[in-house]
Amino acid sequence: MRRISTQYFLATWPLLLGMGLLMLGAGLQGTLIGLRATLDAFPLVLIGAVMSCYYVGYICGSICAPQLVQRVGHIRVFAALTSLASVTILVQALFVTPLVWALLRAASGFCFAGIYVVAESWLNDRATNANRGVALALYMLVLYVGLGGGQFLLNLGDAGGPTLFILVAVLISLAVVPMTLTVQRAPEFDIPQKISVRELYDASPMGVVGVTASGMVTSALFSMGAVYARLSGFEARDIGTFMGVSILAAVLTQLPIGRLSDRVDRRSVLIVVCLLAAGFGLAAAVFGSMSRPLLFLLAASFGGIALTLYSLSLSHINDHLRPDQMVSASSVVILLNGVGAVAGPLLVATLMASFGPAAYFWSLAALVGCLAIYAIWRKGQRGPVEPGHKVRFVTTQPQAASGRMIGVIAHDAALARDDTH
């Protein structure tokens, strides 16, 4: 396994390095935009709408990017979208108005969706059936560390000035260098046939609702967390720490929870995860104001638990699909997750505007609590998946993955499973 991991890393390190730089910029960008909008006194509901526009663009990019890659190739699409993403953040520093920012956030989401499609299809082409799981784990580790580490870059400048915007643009621009200088050939790209949302829901109602709800929770956490922290009186350093621990905690929880879900009914694990996340969210809403360290601990606990919901739901969907359906289903999963992601910031921002900053954690707790109730109801409607028919847990980060690579990994795992029966 170590030899496989080393060989794969040597074959893909330029792209992994590029994605690491890109995620540092993306992690800083999301927090910076929310914080700057708060500093410039954007109305809360308007902040939610602006942040949601990213996910509108993300949905469009997920739909259009495969055709772009097939037409002009991986490197050209990656270079073009990275350049455009860099430009959007610079223009946001020049024109601090809600309408302009909404349009630019949508453009940014479109770019990042395309970048993820390029990265994941490239990485998947370099992987084999023997190392694809390791490949995704390494890729997701780069994404999580980059997104979490980017939060601490908030301390390097004043959010009210242009410095941090320029830093984001520099990091995004640097990401294209390793990709364009690689001597390896670009892979072929095939667009899979899609299955309908109705077909997917009929196969796995719990999984479909889960990936949609996880989109709401994750987008609200990434988009409105910095707004909550600022309205709660945090300075930039503490805002970076608050967001950083909320994201980086997920690095520690994904694998243990995933392994547990491979051994028992995934719905039971999902229910426990939702109840734990709801408990941590409620505790943060009630007791978080007592001390900063306590709030950071509760935020890390909530993020570490809640950010596993997408992977659990995706794995549950794959448990109910045939191997030949999994790659096709991944695009529908991303679409559903994106729809939830559009709604998340709008909902949480509206509640925060009506009830104050504490509504951030109240609303997050309510979302995962409702998902728990639905999961309990679904568990009574259908029996568990037989252990021999379960697909290996797939660790992934919503809105930072196109789903194509995940679908292929699940396909390989299902084939391996079928070969043993």
Image (cartoon, rainbow, N blue to C red):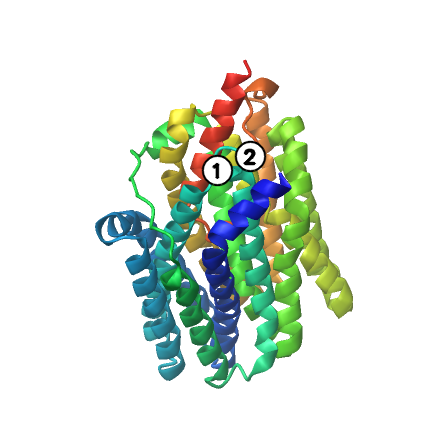
Q: Nearer the viewer, residue 315 or 55?
A: 315
x and y percentages locating residue 393 in the rendered image: 57, 35
Q: Residue 374 shows which numbered tag?
A: 2
User: What residue appears at the point 47 percent right and 52 percent down from the top-left corner?
Assistant: 12
Label 1: which residue? 209
Distance between the alpha carbons at the discs numbered 2 and 1? 9 Å
Task: Name the amino acid type tagged 2.
Answer: Tyr
- Crowd tier of the residue under label 1, counting other residues whose Cα lies within 10 Å: few below 14, some 14–19, many 20 or above: some
Vertical order, 104 against 125 (above or below):
below
Q: Could you say whether the residue bearing mark 1 is in a helix, strand or loop?
A: helix
x and y percentages locating residue 156 in the rendered image: 58, 81
x and y percentages locating residue 127 in the rendered image: 47, 41
Q: Could you say whether the residue bearing mark 2 is in a helix, strand or loop?
A: helix
- Horizontal side of 189 relative to 3 (left or right) equals left
Task: Name the amino acid type tagged 1.
Answer: Val
- Horizontal side of 137 relative to 179 (left or right) equals right
Please tell me how many numbered marks the rendered image carries: 2
User: What residue appears at the point 35 percent right and 81 percent down from the top-left corner?
Assistant: 95
Asked if disc 2 and disc 1 are in contact, CB closer than 8 Å, the reply is: yes
Q: Which of the image's four quarters has the N terminus?
A: top right
Vertical order, 262 against 309 (above or below):
above
- Crowd tier of the residue under label 2, counting other residues whose Cα lies within 10 Å: few below 14, some 14–19, many 20 or above: some
